Image: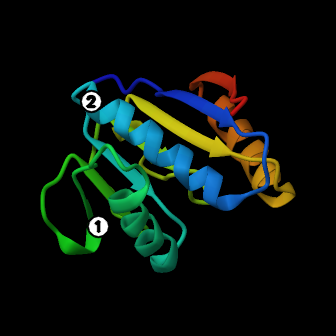
Amino acid sequence: MTVTAPQVDFYILPTKNHQSLLQFCCRLAEKAWKKGNNIHIQTNNSEETNHLDKLMWTYSDSSFLPHATQSENITAPIIIGHEADIKPSDLLINLAVHTPTQHTQFSRIAEILNDDDSIKTNGRIRYAEYKKMGCDLHHHDIKS
């Protein structure tokens, strides 16, 4: 079986606000879910996982995102977790600092960056790693 490198989309937000980054993550997950995709959102730690879990309930007055945390070990279209063992999904949204070790299990990966210096620096490192692995890289400047 031939393993193909995933498409990796880098979304660049014009703010340093981490909450805006998480809000964009919710919007991206909602869009992918409405297209029938299963999504895994990889976070850095349990605090970020719990924060995003709560945000998915409240980020929009007019929508609901069916989700669960990875530690709940239940099936949902959107799974949020920081654990290393990631189950394959249609889309991986990587909020973690590191390049996911299981990146070949996904056909698409989304990286969300903002104007924070440490987030940009880590994003550039991941970009170089993805490029070295032969991934199909795309860059999107988000204006709002």
**Three-letter code for the amino acid on which mark 2 is drawn:** Lys
Q: Residue at x 55, y 44 (%)?
A: 24
Q: Is residue 67 left or right of residue 22?
A: left
Which residue in the protein does label 2 denote?
34
Is residue 118 rendered to the left or right of residue 46?
A: right
- Looking at the rendering, in which quadrant would you find the C terminus? top right
What is the image's colouring?
rainbow
Say which residue appears at 37% left-offset and 31% top-offset. 31
Identify the secondary structure beneath mark 2: helix
Residue type of the residue flagged with mark 1 = Thr
> Is residue 18 among the parts visible in the rendering?
yes
Q: Nearer the viewer, residue 100 or 4?
A: 100
Say whether disc 2 or disc 1 marks the residue closer to the N-terminus: 2
Q: Position of residue 127 (x, y in %)?
A: 70, 37
User: What is the spatial separation of the Cα atoms under label 2 and label 1, in whole angstroms?
Assistant: 19 Å
Is residue 144 placed above or below 73 in the rendered structure? above
Residue tagged by mark 1? 69
Residue 103 in view (yes/no): no
Which of 130 and 72 lies nearest the eye of the viewer? 72
The quarter holding residue 13 reads top right
Give me the residue at 38% from left, 28% from top: 107
Residue 124 rendering spot, x and y as whole percentages = 78, 43
